[in-house]
Image (cartoon, rainbow, N blue to C red):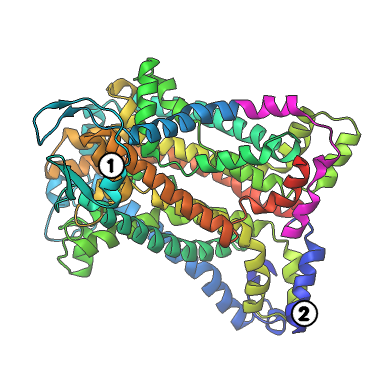
Amino acid sequence: MTALTSAGTAPTRRDRPLSKQNITKTVLGGYLPLLITTLVVFLPLAWMILSSLKTPGEIVTTQLKVLPQNPTMQNYVDAATTVPFARFFLNSVIVTSIASVIKCTLAVVTAYALVFIRFPFKRAIFLLILVALMVPPQVSVLPNYVLIAGLGGLNTYWGIILPGLGTAFGTFLLRQHFLTLPASILESAEIDGANHWTRLWKIVFPISVPTIATVALVTIVTEWNDYIWPLIVIDNPQMMTLPVGLTLLANSDSGSQAWGILMAGAVIVIIPILIIFAALQRYIVAGLTQGSVTG
Amino acid sequence: MSTEAQPRQAVKSGNPKGNKDANKEVGQDRKATTQGRVATLLVAPSLLLLAIVILYPVINAIIMSFQKDSGLDPATGLFVAGGFAGVSNYSHWILQQCSVAGASISCPPGTLGSQFWTAFGTTFFFTAVTVVLETIIGFWMAIIMARAFRGRSLLRASVLVPWAIPTAVTAKLWFFIFAFQGIANQLFGTSILWTGSEWPARWAIIIADVWKTTPFMALLILAGLQIIPEQVYEAARVDGASAWQRFTQITLPLVKPALMVAILFRTLDALRMYDLPAIMTGGSNNTTTLSILVVDQIRQGFNSAAALSTITFIVIFLVAFIFVRFLGANAVESTNPGGKEKEK
């Protein structure tokens, strides 16, 4: 009950859980924002889904019709037959999973070393990582393209994955988190003779699950949505990822018909990530709450 | 006064890890012997990757930015080999000097060179507006998400949805919504050419960006809010602190490190904004950001584009430096006490 009114009113009012003020506070502070936020988030998406079910004539019209008059799956059929969506999906899954695993592992071990191990130039190395975060993608795109093309990486999975591995976001976030961990835990482990590997996986990793899960989520979403680089490095439709494939869809059709098909394609792109996301989201929520208990 | 002082004390005793002073205690490796080999093993893969895909391109770009484009000189019609160009690629952008017929003149309107300061202003305008909006709304969302009530997980899940959608899709979706015969005009009974004139186009991009990225801010701020123990608020409430006092005296100071990091990240990201304006307006009507200008320039000449992207990089670096140095984005500072001792 306390949590219900955690940003609530003075103590005297809070003593009666079902008092009028309390209910008003809960509605205004919890459910009303919930409703507004959900509407703001979902109305554009709902519009996208509704439009994907409409015929071209209904989409571009001067008379607004919210619901499709003759719901049709034709747009989806068209989208799926115009471009190989299943293949795009597979490509996206492969690229995202390999890249995310590598990026998260690197982030964890690098952040651990930067915080818990003593070695020279530590600060310089961290600053370097920080600076890497500031490089505009356009700076690296061209030299990277030359490099990857030279190594024969055009239209390959590793060609898509490699340049993306250089992001330092996870390292940075995890380092900030590791700095807040109590020193005592690791000191006692050290006295017990645990080496760095054991300390990392048996102590630091388990108590950092919430932050690592957040890093994982951010990484997966970034990889799944990556647009500029795959667009440049891939020109074979068989190797395209979903976001790139979507623009292929937009280019292959023109006129009013394109909107419905494009919206259908967009729905196909977001559904998988919504599912993965919903699954991971529960984990994040649990993780964050757990973090507040240990923290 | 006592109500203000006591929560602060409670903070210190109740949460030894969450506050900044405690970070000094995290010099746990002070006793450890030098472990260079383990450290090398752990750090080397990351550094190697950064060297290949970040450092190498940056150095390459800087070298290119001092080179002349080889090709036909439009003025003389003769082939010119590349070679050292001095700072002409930079003055081309910053002083808007175009070289025509061997002489430097001001770039005529319409050329990419003349757009530098406009793009510069546009980029900062977008960054300032979107980051401010996203911080305020994101903070508000994070506070609501941090509360316990029925449907909280639903709220958290749904709030994060726009951020999980590819930018390419977001841009197409909002372009569709803001189309002339789109739903935005029909709902409000207006007939604005949203993506066709300066201010509506800017607002359309800002709305799309805020819709898309606020959840990310909220997530980072929420992570910061989670480390504030509930007992601190309990103690403050027992002491009679008002909601506003609890917010300004407990929440704000304790969440500040996470908040500043979130703002820093968003700012760096916003300064590099490309996808949304590129897809929604193609950079027309003064919505060209520095990144769009770079990509446009790549098609006209690599070396000049390299100079422009180096300028962009330096601008972003300066902004980040100001953040870290003066606004207390705890990116580097928090480790200075421990870090320096460790190195000595």
Q: Quadrant of the N terminus of chain B?
A: bottom right
The percent position of residue B130, horizontal first and vertical second, equals: 40, 60
Extent of the magenta region: B18-44
The percent position of residue A177, horizontal first and vertical second, equals: 67, 47
**Residue B216, can we see it?**
no
Mark 2 near mark 1, Cβ–Cβ under 8 Å? no
> In this picture, is B10 found above or below B340?
below
The percent position of residue B339, horizontal first and vertical second, equals: 73, 45
Question: Secondary structure of the magenta portion, mostly?
Answer: helix
In this view, the residue in front, B106 or A11, is B106
> Is disc 1 placed on a helix, strand or loop?
helix
Q: Quadrant of residue B88?
A: top left
- Type of residue at label 2? Asp
Residue B75 in the magenta stretch? The answer is: no
> In the displayed structure, does residue B182 sit left or right of residue A27?
left
**Residue at the spot of label 1:** B88
> Is disc 2 placed on a helix, strand or loop?
loop
Distance from the alpha carbon under mark 2 to that under mark 1: 66 Å
> In this picture, is B75 found above or below B111?
above
Residue B21 in the magenta stretch? The answer is: yes
Instruction: Give the mark, 2 or 1, whose residue is nearer the N terminus.
Output: 1
> Badge 2, how many Cα within 10 Å: few under 14, some, many 20+?
some
Residue at 34% x, 61% y is B125
> In the displayed structure, does residue A29 sit left or right of residue A250?
right
In this view, the residue in front, A140 or A241, is A140
Residue pushed farthest front? B103
Determine the chain carrying the residue at label 2: B
Residue at 65% x, 43% y is A175
Residue pushed farthest right? A191
